[in-house]
Amino acid sequence: MCRYPLGMTSGQIQDEDISASSQWSESTAARFGRLDFDTGDGDGAWCPDIMSEPGGFKEYLQVDLRSLHFITLVGTQGRHADGMGNEFAQRYRIKYSRDGSSWVGWHDRMGNQVIEGNKNTYDVVLKDLEPPIVARFVRFMPVIDPSLIVCMRVELYGCEWLDGLVSYSIPDGHQMIYRGLDVFFNDSVYDGATAQRLTKGLGQLTDGTWGLDDFLHSHVPGAWPGYDYVGWSNKTFPKGYVEVVFDFDHIHNFTSMKVHCSNMFSRGVRLFRQATCFFRSESEWEPDPMTFRPSAEPLSQSARFVTVPLGDRTASSIKCRFHFGDQWLLFSEVAFQSGSAVYNTSLGPHKHGQPKKTPLGDDPTHKVDDSNTRILIGCLVAIIAILLTIIVIILWRQVWQKMLEKASRRWLDDELTARLAVQTQAFSFLRFSQSSEDGSGSGSISTYERIYPASADYQEPSRLIRKLPEFAECAEHLARASLPESGTSSRAGVGSDGAPHYAEADIISLQESSDSGSITAVNMNLFAGLDSTLREFPREKLTFKEKLGEGQFGEVHLCEAEDMQNFLGEDTLMEGSSKSPLLVAVKMLREDANKNARNDFLKEIRIMSRLRDPNIVRLLAVCVDTDPLCMITEYMENGDLNQFLCSLRLKTLTGGEADQQEGSNEVSSVKLLGMAMQIASGMKYLSSLNFVHRDLATRNCLVGKNDTIKIADFGMSRNLYRGDYFRIQGRAVLPIRWMSWESILLGKFTMASDVWAFGVTLWEILTLCKEQPYSQLSDEQVIENTGEFFRNQGKQVYLPQPQCCPDRIYGDLMLSCWRRNAKERPSFQEIHAQLTESR
Ligand code: ADP
């Protein structure tokens, strides 16, 4: 899971932290070596001056990450420069350093230093670093052919190395002869000095790889017996223990240490009998060590984590003496817990494909984990306290709201007609929200959440879009149009621009401009970007009928809209008589919505106002002159597709019954494919506008009369399906079960990732939404599966063929949506054609 982009692409890594040995010219300086950046500022990449060093082995592009990071993956790209560039690095090496002075050349587990790089100027080539590295400085060193100019754009992926461990020092591992077989327990990836003792480096004990139960085997292809472990025989240790010294970047407050050990006692290998740890904060080791003995003798021979309590001692170095429990002591991983954070074993990739087990669950010495339990209880108490505070605030707000409501009703009763009073029930609480809105800015605890993170670890697609010259202009234009003063004058310019825009560009300008919080300004901005045919509907002409549902923004009501057909004009003929009031769905922004929610609500309005397609839910009008903000959309009688399908059964075709009518709650596979075809048609339209939906799923499609399906929910999720979204490290809530591997791992959202989501949506439809995709996998396992898609070693799990899914649809269509290479996935045009044909 530790595979986040570290900031070359997003710009989080500053220009001054990117340097190089040389540059061909000012316009190919190091700062242009950012992967996926081709902004037109420079010449599109970093290119070294090959004349300065004819040998061509010392040129490098250096990235300073400012702190230690666990780096698991690197990405490179050549110089494309809008088709002008034709330079790339076919091969390169990596050097890294933790302190900026001593540098280590990276090599893979087999000792190869050279990494195969790019084959063309535009494709990003990602390479797993096996083993991963812990470093602050990383250098990319292209292997240069003197006759060619080489240019590079790069990105690093990983996460921050919170462990703080900068080196460990151990006696080098020994060799065992087991039944005539040579078993090597040396630390083969150690990156420090390797004399009698290994010093000043990190290696296998911190590479995130846990050894298998049987130490003769390893998951690393081609590895020798004993590869995963570093081990020692007691014969060379007359004192009966092995001494390991751990050095940290600064003083930590240590809670415990976890040591992953082999326990194959049938081969003379056992957990350590005792660990005695000394602490040092300054120059001297403190005299009072901590001693720990694993309590019970474990019967199982499986490898396990043993937790050694460190009693909250402060230190910048720890020296532990591990006493032999038998002839051999074998370790594969060591991790430290200090303060409140748990480090490398939880962050490091777990390459053995076993489900991640907590060391505690494995550990026969669980009694010693009392300190963990105490921390856990402390956290739970804190969470409960926070929840109670939130509940009290909510209750307080509700009481206050009711008082306001009462006051307002009394006042309104004098003036308003009976009909208005009915509407008041639906809207009044928001009419008077102006004053509460003011208060909510500071103290609100809205339940609203953003789905897409603003964090640099996850790239906002809007960033990508802004980089594209054709959209950057549009975004800038809109940003200008969004300034309150220029709102009116720019209206015509934007309105007359009939060209399709990528909606995200609008989002940004709207969000930036509405920071002022002024309703008038927001509304002016809103209209500046709106389709000119969308107008303010008089809200007194809406009569509340019933509540249809509740979304992220607030309630959705079924209302009668008086005179709506006349209001819309002849261009927009809606089903239903023009005389009778038209039934519409009214989505309202809830009273306690914060600024972000408000902006996102306006964003959805702006996006929807431009979309016109039979398979996209149509926005008819808005009420944004006063609060509550409302959007009026066409009414879809049968609610959302997920609930709709869930209530149906599959019609089985048996003999003569085949021609019979479907029962009221039965549906045939042909009809299901027809529904999928409609979604494909809507998506085809969206993709023709270069619009990326990012959250296609049955829950976000609505069903009208005669099984008409329309796509809704542009950029938002809803609370009803909270279980479908997954929160990554408290930052982002993402619909991971619908997301392509590149969206999850690289934050890339494209039309091809929408195609992936379509594949999952098609699967949902053909299983009648009876279960969640990958229901047998936990969220963490879904993420691990994504890693398998990335690694592409045939271990990835696909959604199975639904019972009623024809072989051709599964093999040719559904599976093709989940192809690893996004370019090989079909387009929505092709998908639509294929589904049309199959009917
Ligand atoms: P949000 O986008 O804020 O999550 P939704 O638009 O999903 O809110 O609306 C919540 C629920 O309201 C949906 O699940 C659906 O049942 C109902 N709903 C929304 N729009 C319509 C509509 N146009 N016609 C019928 N029902 C609707």
Image (spheres, rainbow, N blue to C red):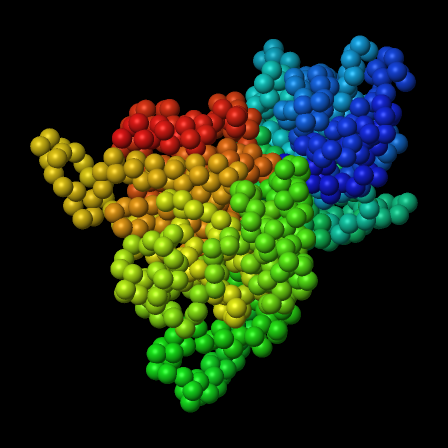
Q: Residue at x 42, y 31 (%)?
A: 829
Q: Residue at x 64, y 33 (%)?
A: 208
Q: Nearer the viewer, residue 697 or 627?
A: 627
Q: Nearer the viewer, residue 823 or 357?
A: 823
Q: Tell me where residue 268 appears, x and y as whole percent.
A: 61, 25
Q: Residue at x 60, y 67 (%)?
A: 520
Q: Dividing the image into 4 quarters, which one contains the C terminus? A: top left
User: Eyeballing the image, is 399 above or below 559?
Assistant: below
Q: Nearer the viewer, residue 278 or 90?
A: 90
Q: Nearer the viewer, residue 14 or 383?
A: 14
| Residue lying furthest left | 656
Q: Tell me where residue 735 appears, x and y as whole percent.
A: 49, 45
Q: Quadrant of residue 50?
A: top right
Q: Tell me where residue 205 appears, x and y as whole percent.
A: 69, 32
User: Eyeballing the image, is 25 above or below 769?
Assistant: above
Q: Quadrant of residue 541?
A: bottom left
Q: Quadrant of residue 203?
A: top right
Left or right relative to 459: residue 586: left
Q: Residue at x 38, y 75 (%)?
A: 423
Left or right relative to 49: residue 633: left
Taking the image as drawn, is residue 450 in sight? no
Taking the image as drawn, is residue 14 in sight? yes
